[in-house]
Amino acid sequence: MSQRERILKILQRALERGQTVEIDGLGTFGTAAGGDYEFLPQTKPWVFIACVEEDLALARRLRDGIAAADCSPWMDKDKLLPGQDWPRAIRRAIEISDAFVACFSTQSIVKRGPFQSELRWALRCARRMPLDETFVIPVRFDRCCVPREIQERSQYVDLFPDWDAGIKKVIRALRQKARAGHEPGCRLISSG
């Protein structure tokens, strides 16, 4: 039995048990009212949110605002499963995202770790897109210095002192991207 046939068998068993199967960035398989299987494609803009652990509460507040605007936010703390190859899952999630929201703060700009790796990967994805296409959306949680490479390319949004005004700007950028009808992310194929 091929890998494809095994995957289809797993999908079919889940559907026969009445479960839905979501494939991040693509959509959801489920059982329709008549018993047939149906696929509902992901139509909401898919937004990767990158932050450091110290900013998690603010990032979740941002996530909630983005979700309320009919977008699908993706955060590692919410989406990664136990035992999952998290570096690979995160790279893939960035690759297929419609936008990458980088959360900058006095903590994130000095801390080494996953946030910096995610930001570098997002910049790599952005280099493959048309020059006028928005992908990386920098936001500031406090009066920190946005890294020069970001500052030279992108306008950032301050979520302080007026959170609501800042969120409106982020949502406006996401909606403009959705109206443009671009394909999600840079669709890189990562090897590992």
Image (spheres, helix red, strand yellow):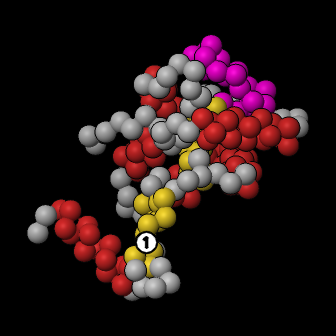
Task: Point out the image quarter for the N terminus.
Answer: bottom left
Question: Looking at the picture, how far across and down is residue 192, in whole percent?
Answer: 28, 42
* Residue at image location 73% in from the left, 41% down from the top: 171
Which amino acid, mark 1?
Answer: Glu
- Front-most of 134 and 162? 134
**Above or below: residue 102 compared with residue 90:** above
Q: Is residue 141 magenta?
A: yes
* Residue at image location 40% in from the left, 80% down from the top: 36
* Residue at image location 44% in from the left, 55% down from the top: 26
Q: Secondary structure at mark 1?
A: strand
Which corner quadrant of the image does residue 82 belong to? bottom left
**Above or below: residue 149 compared with residue 3:** above
**Residue at numbered disc 1:** 38
- Front-most of 97 and 43? 43
- Front-most of 60 and 156? 156
Q: Is residue 136 magenta?
A: no
Question: Looking at the picture, how far across and down is residue 64, in whole percent?
Answer: 72, 55
Which corner quadrant of the image does residue 100 belong to? top right
* Residue at image location 49% in from the left, 32% down from the top: 122
Q: Which residues are magenta?
A: 138-158
Q: Would residue 115 be seen by someone viewing this image from the given angle? A: no
Question: Looking at the picture, how far across and down is residue 96, in whole percent?
Answer: 45, 43
Q: Would residue 126 be seen by someone viewing this image from the given angle? A: yes
> Is residue 80 toward the left or the right of residue 135 in the image?
left
| Circle 1 crowding by C-alpha within 10 Å: few under 14, some 14–19, many from 20 | some
Residue sitting farthest toward the left: 1
> Is residue 57 toward the left or the right of residue 116 in the image?
right
